[in-house]
Amino acid sequence: MLSFFRIVWQVATFRRSPADVPHSQPLCLYALACSAFLSALFVFVLRGDLANFAESYLVSLLLNGFFVFWLVGFARKRERFLQTFTAMLGASCVVLIAQIVVAVIATGGGSVTLGQILFEFVVLWSLLIDAYILSRALEIAFLFGGLIAFGLFLMQLNVLRAIAGGA
């Protein structure tokens, strides 16, 4: 598993392609479990409770998974779905660790403004990672991968806001 995190770190730092992630369903499930755990930890650190976490995470996961599945199918590269989705889940683990660190720094006596700025940089980094993964997996220009990643981000944000507002 350490080699998986090494590959994911290298994908998140734009040094390796998502094609380098092994094509393995158990590995995808492992990345999913790590992402769920780190997401729950992040929500707990940020808010102190896990209210609405399960449905929010599940909806976000399903949206992301369906959207990536549709995209790779549309691009006629369906065989890349598992690697692409595993790379995105693994990269989200890297980003979540950074977000947890920033949340702890911001709440642990650090400047709120500094914490907000750092958090925005981590969100931007996350969008760039998704753009990189999608552009490589779909064999499209990075700009188009960025537009797709930004659209996915906005879609998830709106759906999660609707869930939070409806609860």
Image (spheres, rainbow, N blue to C red):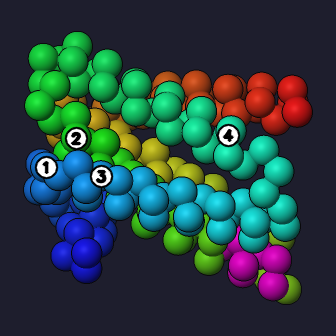
Identify the residue at horizontal 35%, vertical 48% (top origin): 88
* Quarter of the image where one finds residue 162: top right
Q: Is mark 4 on a helix, strand or loop?
A: helix
Check whether the beta carbons of the residues at disc 2 and disc 1 lie within 8 A of each other. Answer: yes
Q: What element carries label 2?
A: helix
Q: For this rendering, which residue is in front, 36 or 152?
A: 36
* Residue labelled with disc 4: 56
* Residue labelled with disc 3: 28
Q: What residue type is labelled 1?
A: His
Check whether the beta carbons of the residues at disc 3 and disc 2 lie within 8 A of each other. Answer: yes
Q: Which amino acid does label 2 sit on?
A: Leu
Q: Give the spatial CA distance, label 3 vs label 2.
A: 7 Å
Is 157 magenta? The answer is no
* Residue labelled with disc 2: 82
Q: Which amino acid does label 4 sit on?
A: Ser
- Residue 140 seen by the camera: no
Ranked by sequence position, the earlier of labels 2 and 1 is 1
- Residue 37 seen by the camera: yes
* Span shown in magenta: 102-108
How many marks are shown on the rendered structure?
A: 4
* Residue labelled with disc 1: 23
* Residue most extreme to the top: 74
Check whether the beta carbons of the residues at disc 4 and disc 1 lie within 8 A of each other. Answer: no
Check whether the beta carbons of the residues at disc 1 and disc 3 lie within 8 A of each other. Answer: no
